[in-house]
């Protein structure tokens, strides 16, 4: 179906989701985000992609990929704990780890901005227990252990500038 509207801002008001874990997505207001203009947070017909993938690769491949994503988050946590100044706010779980550098909330925001500007890695922020946190999700099947090590090293260098 299709809906035509005169004021696109009304669609954004109706459909935009402003969860803490999505706050960096809304920083770039000049970009058109289709998720802000419709019912689904992502594009439609995901069920067919899942079904075809299960038929092609099998359930075991999915299990392995998910377990690998979890292991990469645990690796990121270990790498962060091994460096001074980094605090784990939420241990690795479900392929995500939340952390911060130092005690200044503004520093977390600056690190996200620098990471986005340099396009080295996708880093987002959120809020945990009333403090700004950095969030790293490691579920992408193309992410390697070396990618995680390099990303943490790069973030450490950015934080110490």
Image: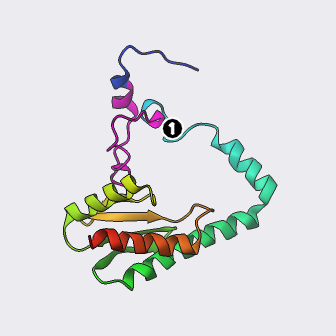
Residue 78 spot, x, y in % from top left:
45, 82
| Above or below: residue 123 compared with residue 92 | above
Whether the magenta-drawn stretch holds residue 13 is answered as: yes
Residue at left offset 47%, top offset 15%: 4
Q: Is residue 15 shown left or right of residue 146? A: left
Label 1 packing within 10 angstroms: few (<14), some (14-19), many (20+): few
Residue at left offset 59%, top offset 70%: 144
Q: Looking at the image, can residue 159 be seen?
A: yes
Residue under label 1 = 40
Closest to the observer: 115 or 161?
161
| Above or below: residue 59 compared with residue 19 | below
Residue 86 spot, x, y in % from top left:
31, 78
Residue at left offset 64%, top offset 38%: 45
Q: Looking at the image, can residue 131 be seen?
A: no
Element marked by disc 1: loop
Assign the C terminus to one quadrant of the image: bottom left
Q: Residue furthest right?
A: 56
Residue 48 spot, x, y in % from top left:
71, 42
Closest to the observer: 83 or 94?
83
Magenta residues, as a range?
11-35
Closest to the observer: 92 or 39?
92
Magenta span: helix, strand or loop, mainly? Answer: loop
Whether the magenta-drawn stretch holds residue 94 is answered as: no
| Above or below: residue 91 compared with residue 107 | below
């Amino acid at each position: 179906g299709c809906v035509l509207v005169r004021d696109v801002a009304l669609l954004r008001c109706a459909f935009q989701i402003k969860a803490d874990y999505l706050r960096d997505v809304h920083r770039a207001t000049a970009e058109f985000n289709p998720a802000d203009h419709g019912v689904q947070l992502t594009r439609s017909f995901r069920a067919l992609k899942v079904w075809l993938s299960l038929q092609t690769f099998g359930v075991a491949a999915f299990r392995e990929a998910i377990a690998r994503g979890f292991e990469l988050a645990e690796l990121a946590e270990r790498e962060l704990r091994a460096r001074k100044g980094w605090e784990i706010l939420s241990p690795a779980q479900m392929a995500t780890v939340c952390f911060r550098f130092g005690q200044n909330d503004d520093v977390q925001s600056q690190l996200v901005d620098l990471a986005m500007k340099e396009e080295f890695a996708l880093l987002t922020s959120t809020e945990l227990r009333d403090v700004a946190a950095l969030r790293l999700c490691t579920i992408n099947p193309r992410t390697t252990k070396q990618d995680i090590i390099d990303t943490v090293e790069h973030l450490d260098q950015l934080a110490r500038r």
